[in-house]
Image (cartoon, rainbow, N blue to C red):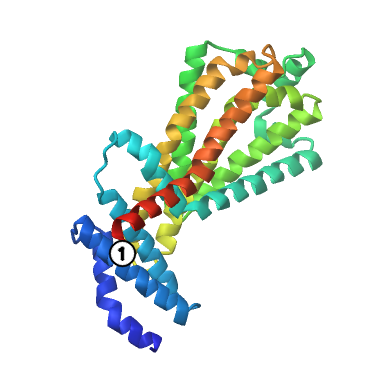
Amino acid sequence: MREVYFIKQNKEKWLGIEQVVQGKIKKNPDDLSSLYINLVNDLSFAQTYYPKSNTVVYLNHLSSQIFQKIYKTKRVEENRLVYFFKTEVPLIVYEYRRYLVYSFLFFIFFMLIGVLSAIYDKDFANLILSEGYVNMTIENIKNGNAVGVYQDGSTWGSTIGITFNNILVGAKLYIYGITCGLGTLYLLMQNSIMVGTFQYFFYEHGALGDSARGIWLHGAFEIFSMVVEGMCGLILGTSILFPKTLSRFNSFKNGFKNSFKIFLSTIPFTICAGIIEGYVTRHALKMPLVLNLIIIFGCIGIIGFYYFIYPHIVNRRVKKHINDAIL
């Protein structure tokens, strides 16, 4: 069958499925399952006979959308908040997983720029971190207290201020995506360069180990959350730039809805980072090194598992659940 005829034959059905995905037409779970089976059959046919065609890309995207629609219409037996973090967010993260990779690559690239700039320009740290902060930290290092800056102020006061500031930075990283992602990239660049400069500054003054023991106690959650928030901004931006088969407005609505849910999922991690920074980081050099490492790698393991590994587990589980239901 020629591709033009294949498209003409199924066009109305596919447009109808788009209406269902957008919520303009309501279907019960059984009807959705039937649509899904039909669409998967069309996708398999297109993959066999038109493997390099845009039709395959279109049907693959549409099938993933109807796939999520099916699962969301199933009765949710568990608590809505538990379902949000346990199933809904991981499924969305899985769908947009490449944006998380992009955000991490941008973070690493910009951080290396910070390191290289600090290596070749001795005044770069003063420019990025401020001269006052640099001088204070050098004095702390000389006194054998590289993380002394985290010991100022009360624990609860520091926690509230730090948490509020981190949520604000994360919100900007996300919302600036409305500039087609350019604002998100600019803010991610600023923060990533600061991280690279910050770490090289301590290395240059022979205190990288002590600084890492303190900074990464809260930085594991804080910086990883920043990268995920950058991912959200990129999703928002590309939903405007590349609407695919949807209108630009509907694409933006879908992009905003999904990216906002991912952004909300970072807030508990940001709050935990603020609590650790306010209450734990100030004691970093007094606690046993083993305890430092347990907290740091424990935090990295938790947040890394949630955003990188768990979405694949949930996706496989849901696919199995749906396949069992429709067979």
Q: Residue at x 45, y 36 (%)?
A: 266
Residue 74 makes an appearance in the image: yes
**Residue 258, percent from left and from top:** 37, 49
Q: Residue at x 65, y 18 (%)?
A: 291
Residue 243 makes an appearance in the image: no
Above or below 93: residue 250: below
Classify mark 1: residues with Cα within 10 Å, few (<14), some (14-19) or many (20+): many
Q: Nearer the viewer, residue 57 or 168?
A: 57
Above or below 8: residue 158: above
- The residue beneath circle 1 is 36
| Quarter the C terminus occupies | bottom left
Q: Nearer the viewer, residue 123 or 137?
A: 137
| Quarter the N terminus occupies | bottom left
Determine the secondary structure under disc 1.
helix
Classify residue 124 as left or right of residue 32.
right
**Residue 13, percent from left and from top:** 25, 73
**Residue 10, percent from left and from top:** 29, 78
